[in-house]
Image (tube, rainbow, N blue to C red):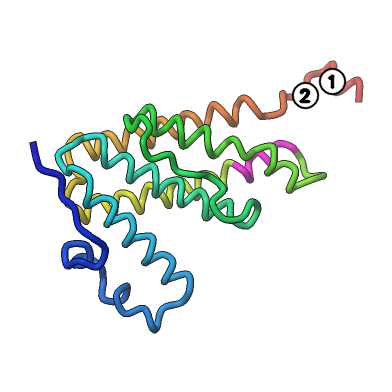
Amino acid sequence: MATPVSATPGSSAATSSIPAAAKDDGNMSVAAKAKAQLNVSIVQASLTVSLNSSNEPLSVLLKTALTGINEALKDDFGDNAIQNAVSQDNTPEGTASRIVSLSTAFYDAFKQQHPGEDGDAVLNKFMETLQKGVDQGFKEARGVLDGLKVLNGDVASNIDKTYELVQKGYADFAAAHKAPPATAETKGAA
């Protein structure tokens, strides 16, 4: 079993893979600086994880997926719409369940932000927002894990399985919240 790798912030181990642009942030926009700081914190947190464990990289996936969702929901709900729970079940099922449940919990508030709009249109907009955030988060997680040279074997397949479970969870949520189709009886009553 591999010994956990750890590094202190600012040490060469923690900063050796950080792009020069992130180290010299004098010419970076505020958004780029924030993104670079997020990436540094993810890498630093990841360095304390045993790279031999097959489930720990999914905690990085959870963090980056939720960060992407937080960014997508920021305009409607402000910063940190979803808090990352670090010490939870990091299996594909547990990770997907938290991503789906934490992100879809904002649906009622999202509907309130769009009064007077068609229910299915609001649901579609909400699901598109979540999908954008989750896609961004999974892409970033893959990038981080690839950079750490742990995106292979069980880690890669667990990420794929987690993504599939999130997609299924989102499809189930959308199906449960769609307006029922109008029947001849409801059309005649209108």
Q: Which residues are magenta?
A: 119-126
Horizontally, is 105 left or right of 59 in the view?
right
Amino acid type at circle 2 is Ala
Residue 174, horizontal then vertical, whole percent: 59, 31
Packing grade of label 2 (10 A; few <14, some 14-19, many >=20) is few
Secondary structure at badge 2 equals loop
Verify CB contact (< 8 Å) between mark 1 and mark 2.
yes
Image quadrant for the C terminus? top right
**Quadrant of residue 79 within the rendered picture:** bottom right
Residue 14, horizontal then vertical, whole percent: 22, 62
| Residue 134 sits inside the magenta stretch | no
Residue behind mark 1: 186
Give the numbered dot on residue 182.
2
Give the numbered dot on residue 95.
none
Majority SS type along the magenta span? helix
Amino acid type at circle 1 is Thr
**Quadrant of residue 189 within the rendered picture:** top right
Q: Residue at x 46, y 37 (%)?
A: 99
Front residue of 131/81: it is 81
Q: Residue at x 69, y 37 (%)?
A: 108
